[in-house]
Structures are given as structure tokens and as C-alpha cells.
């Protein structure tokens, strides 16, 4: 059995549920531990009674952790979420002694294949991380980190726990959403982990963590209804920057990276994700009052609302970073 963990609040609820659905589809045996970063997120997921899921309320996670609560008081909400990244696996290792290998996943990942080849790569290592794999034209972006926090595997052994404890201490000391020398949020610390800690390996499978920032670094093809990344099957895509703008219009998040949105990418990567998200909107019980839409910008009534929506649509169309999806 594979053990995964993630965290999100009610704003990312449908993304987290889409991640779960993709694991169900492609992973024969797994457990997903979800840190619920808002009460409404916990209440909604608890009402769904998901059999493969273990829910962690934020209050339980924070209880007795004075260092984490002190950090919470001096950073923004998103920066605090980043701060929690290394603390979550350590919390789960304490609470679930049967877990030997735990993999943190960003909640905006979506699986297209069984992740078994990645765990075969990890075999014998204590920590596994994954690179951004920027194409040459975007290599300057490595200043924000060579590695991406989308997938971080940790083993319950001396090297794995020592690395995690170091990572947690660094994030408690400083975890802010701007570049400061060799620090940036929870991400740039991975550069140090990769160079300074024994037992750390970097995943090489090309089909892992494909995303807007690296999609132009590979040749994509469709083979028997599946996407191949160079010669490797696409295992999971990272939908960072993806947003519903209005109705059937979506921003795919390519414009900062000048990625090419081809028909293959549109139909075999983004359409399945959009279908999953749209199918999940009805799962939240109405009584919770949770906005489960997929990161849609908050609406504004009247003429101002139409003006804001029009500006968003114009921006993504000019930048060719949009999809119109119709069932």
C-alpha cells in the first residue's frame, strides 16, 4: 500500500477530490491523509465519508506545537500553509507507526497512470524529490528553486527523519512568498536537501510532474489514447496556475512560461481534469455553504463584475493561455 498526504482548504476542495479520484483510478492500494486547513473543508470531507482517506483537522495538527503556532502569527495564510509542508509528514509518522514511506503531494496534481514506476525509482532511498526541469529558455527561473514541492517522499529511517526535521526547522524560521538569497517559501530548501543530505534522490521519470513550466522541454505524443512524454508515459500532471475564469472559459496557466497549448494537451490532459472538477462541484452538501468551485475568482455584482470578468478573459485570450470547454 502507498501512503500519500496533502493539505488544502475549502477553496481547493474540488482539486483535492480530483486528486483522490485520479488515485482511485490508477493506484490499486493507497491511503491519503488530508490536513484540512479550514473547518468547512473538514466538515465537507467528513460528510462524504471517503474510505481511503484519513482526515486531520487543523486544530488537532496544531495542538501542542508552539513553534508552529508562533510561525503562524507572523506570516500570511498561504505562507503558513507552505510552512506546514515538512511538519505534516513528521506529524503522520508520529501518529501512524505502520507508515514506513510517506509521499507528500500538492493538491493540484492529477494522475493519468499508476505511480508504481516512481516508487521503483525510490527503492533504497530515504528522500525523493523532483526537479522543475525548465527548458533552456526558462533556466533563469531556477533562482526560485531547482526542485518542485509537488512530490516529496520521506522514509521513516535515520536519514529521512533527520532531513525532515531540518526542513521543518528551516520553514519555521523563514517561509515567505518572496525570494531572499537562498530561500523562497518551502521550495528553495530542497536545493540544499539535494546537495547536503545522504539518501536524497531526484526522480528521473519524464512523465512525473509535467507542468506549465516544463511542458516545452519534452516531446509529447498520443499512443493508444495515452500521453507519452518523450518515451515515458505521463504519470501525473501538475495543474499549477489553472483557473476557471467564467462559465466554460479556463486559464491553463501557460502564459508566464510561454508554453504551447496543442490539441493533444488540450484534449488529453486538460479536458479530463476539467470534466473531473465539474463532476465534483455537486459533492459538497449545500448546508455547509462551501464554495467548491475550482479556484474561480470571487464574483462582483453589477457592471464592475462584468468589467473584471471581461478583463480576465481578454488577458488569457491575448496570451493564448485559455481553453473553452464544452461537454
Image (spheres, helix red, strand yellow):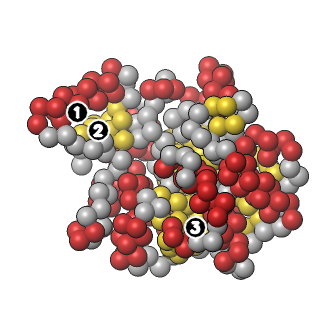
Task: Kindly identify which numbered label has been placed on residue 110.
Answer: none
Left or right position of 202 against 158: left
Q: Tell me if label 2 and label 1 are in contact, CB under 8 Å.
A: yes
Instruction: Compare residues 241 and 278 and report the one nearer the observer.
Output: 241
Left or right position of 38 against 89: left
Q: Is residue 109 above or below residue 252?
A: below
Residue hosting label 3: 62
Viewer can see residue 28: no
Q: Quote the CA–CA distance across marks 3 and 2.
A: 34 Å
| Badge 3 element | helix
Residue hosting label 2: 245
| Badge 1 element | helix
Residue hosting label 1: 309
Residue density around tag 2, few if under 14, some if 14–19, many if 20 or more, within 10 Å: many
Determine the image quadrant of residue 30: bottom right
Q: Is residue 113 above or below residue 287?
A: above
Q: Position of residue 33 (x, y in %)?
A: 56, 69
Tell me which residue sits at (76%, 40%) in the image.
191
Labels 3 and 1: the sequence-earlier one: 3
Q: Position of residue 48 (x, y in %)?
A: 37, 75
In this rendering, the label closer to the viewer, 3 or 2? 3
Tell me which residue sits at (67%, 44%) in the image.
174
Amino acid at each position: 500500500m502507498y501512503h500519500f498526504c496533502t493539505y488544502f482548504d475549502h477553496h481547493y476542495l474540488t482539486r483535492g477530490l480530483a486528486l483522490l479520484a485520479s488515485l482511485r483510478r490508477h493506484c490499486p492500494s493507497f491511503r491519503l491523509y488530508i490536513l484540512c486547513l479550514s473547518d468547512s473543508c473538514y466538515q465537507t470531507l467528513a460528510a462524504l465519508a471517503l474510505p481511503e482517506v484519513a482526515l486531520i483537522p487543523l486544530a488537532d495538527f496544531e495542538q501542542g506545537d508552539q513553534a508552529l503556532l508562533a510561525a503562524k502569527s507572523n506570516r500570511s495564510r498561504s505562507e503558513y500553509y507552505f510552512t506546514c509542508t515538512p511538519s505534516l509528514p513528521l506529524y503522520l509518522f508520529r501518529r501512524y507507526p505502520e507508515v514506513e514511506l510517506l509521499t507528500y503531494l500538492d493538491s493540484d496534481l492529477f494522475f493519468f497512470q499508476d505511480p508504481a514506476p516512481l516508487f521503483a525509482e525510490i527503492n533504497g532511498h530515504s528522500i525523493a524529490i523532483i526537479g522543475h526541469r525548465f527548458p533552456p529558455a526558462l533556466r533563469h527561473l531556477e533562482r526560485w528553486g531547482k526542485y518542485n514541492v509537488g512530490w516529496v517522499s520521506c522514509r521513516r529511517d535515520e536519514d529521512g527523519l533527520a532531513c525532515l526535521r531540518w526542513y521543518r526547522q528551516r520553514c519555521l524560521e523563514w517561509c515567505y512568498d518572496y525570494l531572499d538569497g537562498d530561500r523562497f517559501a518551502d521550495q528553495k530548501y530542497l536545493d540544499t536537501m539535494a546537495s547536503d543530505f545522504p539518501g536524497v534522490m531526484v526522480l528521473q521519470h519524464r512523465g512525473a510532474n509535467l507542468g506549465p513550466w516544463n511542458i516545452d522541454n519534452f516531446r509529447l505524443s498520443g499512443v493508444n489514447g495515452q500521453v507519452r512524454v518523450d518515451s515515458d508515459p505521463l504519470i501525473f500532471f501538475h495543474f499549477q496556475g489553472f483557473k476557471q475564469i467564467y462559465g466554460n472559459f479556463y486559464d491553463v496557466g501557460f502564459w508566464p512560461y510561454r508554453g504551447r497549448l496543442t490539441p493533444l494537451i488540450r484534449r488529453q490532459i486538460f479536458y479530463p481534469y476539467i470534466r473531473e472538477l465539474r463532476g465534483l462541484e455537486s459533492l459538497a452538501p449545500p448546508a455547509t455553504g462551501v464554495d467548491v468551485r475550482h479556484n474561480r475568482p470571487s464574483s462582483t455584482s453589477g457592471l464592475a463584475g462584468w468589467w473584471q470578468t471581461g478583463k480576465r478573459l481578454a488577458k488569457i485570450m491575448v496570451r493564448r493561455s485559455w481553453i473553452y470547454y464544452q461537454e
